[in-house]
Amino acid sequence: MKVIEVVVPVPLNQTFYYLPLQNTDPQSIAGKRIKVKFKNRPMTAYALAVRETAENDFELKPIESIIDNENVITKESLELAKYISGNYVCSLGEALASIIPVSMKIPKRKPKDVFAGDENSYDIRHNLNAAQQNAADMINKSISGGENGKFLMFGITASGKTEVYLTCIEHALNLGKSAIMLISEISLTPQFVDIVTKRFGCKIGVWHSAVSDTEKYKLYMKAKNGEIKIMLGARSAVFAPFENLGLIIIDEEHEHTYKQEQKPSYDAREIAFWRGNYHKASVVLGSATPSLESYKDALENKLALIELPERIDKKRLPEVKVLSLKNKIYGRSLLLPETIDAISKALAKKEQVIVFLNRRGYSPSIMCRKCGSVFQCPSCSISMVYHRNPDLLKCHYCGESKKLPAVCCVCQSKEISVFGTGTQKVEDELKKMFSGAKIFRLDGDTASSKEVYSNAYKGIKNEEYDILLGTQMIAKGFDFPRVSLVCVIDADTSLYLPDFKSAEKTFQIITQVAGRCGRGDMRGNVIVQTGHPEHYAIECAKKHDFTAFYKAETEYRKKLFYPPYCDIAKIVVKNKDDKKAEEDSERLFILLEGFIKSCELHIKLLGPAPAYISKLHNTYRKHIIIKGNKEDMLKAAPLISAYKQSAGTQISIEIMPSDLI
Ligand code: ADP
Ligand code: ZN
Ligand code: ZN
């Protein structure tokens, strides 16, 4: 008798068997997504193969229906799923679900093709300068030779990395191969779609979280059948099922967005290297501020280092002025007189300004002036943020919102004040000071749809706006030639988070946002307001000195034994009952400790301790951190799955998390 072997996206590392549909060739089911009843729940499953069993097994249920018309599971996707399952602690079904989304839907009607780009546009091609040509030559040679080259292109801001990417994509296409290009931030999609479609027309697909389920299905099949040759997109575009892959580019490779936080917590860079090896394709990581891990790999020749040390046309990097917020009176405006002066001068010259503050909302804290209590979210251990229009307190972690209370909930005093500055407040202040200026604010509150990103991009590009104000969404990647001034309102938003990467993230974001100006004909100027002008992350960013930062930061990491000098994993133990969360984390810790000793594993445990945000969504969270080498961590991982926790406890493990918060 013939049965279908399937996997389901649940945390059980085994395959299951179902009977084929009647009147259907069992062989035609393998390779497709199907609907099954799994533990009495309807579920999408992946049909892997047809198996022969000796006798009728009456226990087996038939599958409910077949979702796909054509095969979606490729030989490569199965092997990649095995790799993901083995390296990020998840089941084969869960791994497959991240490669071939469960949610992809076959369009009902034949959809008309929407051409992503602006059809009236024409492509500006630049003759590569010597450094760009050298970069392109190295990469193209590797693509031609099917060499599985691995490159780190360390090119300062506006050194022309994008032009190199385009040249190499073209080379891959000319050889009949396909290419994937990953970008780090959804707000950059309109710019890159514009640039890439101008050069390659309809050969490109665009893939990110805001793409619809039917569009995703279309893109998936087109990539698989070779109807498109380029996939441009966010992290998950790395799975585009091209059969003849020649090149994978990861722009701004240092960004944490390439790391998936949920299970499976894969890193798109590692997936790219795996696929590069599978296809004998080349992988290019590009950045003006490489991650310490990648730069160290380059110094150790695990990646070939390509440098673009100068800006296009030898334009100068902007001058960075650091202004201290040290004696700033708490509660007053964060805009220093010198900053205001610089903005008004730039506006008077009809130049554009970028104002960056990585904090949305109006004011990040609400305090009772009488008893000093701070208003926290009722479900999370974090303060609520005051927003205007409408007037609300919002929790940025669980989304809860409520009215600003009239009296303090502790002492009933009416003396409630809001403190601190978010992007809304900066917008208010800028509007008051520069009444004629047109301001575009781009942050998590205004970016409600795809259109907002393209409005921001086009609006600034076409000079309909004078000031672009926003959070990390505006801090990187943009190429706006008329921006001559960048103001960082508060460089310290990420500086003192209890995370080993906080200095690195601060250095990166300041360098990146500073790099947004002076890209055209005007010299750029940057103002960085900070309460810690002497901090090495700020000093190195001021001097545009990546190497100095790398040196200082790696010394610190080495001393404290953190990546890139070891691997790291984060175990999170959660329960709505604080006591149970604590007990489970302690028992698990002891269990792991015993296992590590008896197996002589080279890993070290830290914790258990409450997470930085110790309560989230009414759930208490405890962390156990593992340091050491990954192989040994993975050996200990089965212990976590096998651990019998108390009712209501959830345990997850993230290998190489992007933060420890
Ligand atoms: P990066 O990605 O390194 O920040 P870009 O690729 O955005 O830099 O290049 C910066 C600007 O220089 C862009 O406007 C781009 O069109 C232009 N550019 C790139 N290469 C050249 C070149 N060889 N000659 C002239 N202009 C160039
Ligand atoms: Zn009070
Ligand atoms: Zn909350």
Image (tube, rainbow, N blue to C red):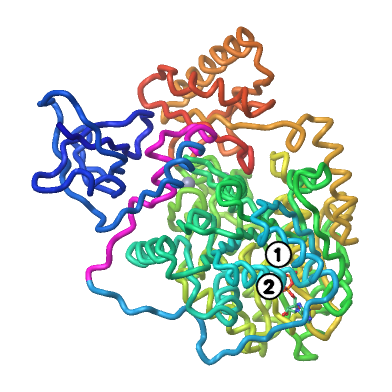
Instruction: Reply above or below: 540 against 313.
Output: above
Q: Which mark is residue 523?
A: none
Pointer 2: what residue?
167
Depth check, mark 2 against mark 1: the one in front is 1
Looking at the rendered image, the quarter that the N terminus falls into is top left
Q: Is mark 1 within 8 Å of ligand 1?
A: no
Tell which circle, 2 or 1, labels the residue nearer the N-terminal end: 1
Foreground: 624 or 561?
561
Instruction: Reply above or below: 240 against 478.
Output: above
Q: Is residue 283 visible?
A: yes
Pointer 1: what residue?
140
Magenta residues, start to end: 84-108
**Residue 61 point in image, percent of width and height:** 14, 34
Q: Residue furthest front?
A: 145
Magenta span contains residue 102: yes
Disc 2/disc 1 C-alpha distance (Å): 9 Å
| Residue at 61% from the left image edge and 10% from the top image edge | 599
Instruction: Reply above or below: 184 against 495.
Output: below
| Residue at 52% from the left image edge and 53% from the top image edge | 396
Q: Residues within 10 Å of mark 2 (few under 14, many from 20)?
A: many
**Residue 274 point in image, percent of width and height:** 58, 45
Name the amino acid, label 2.
Thr
Foreground: 657 or 606?
657
Residue 565 falls in image quadrant: top right
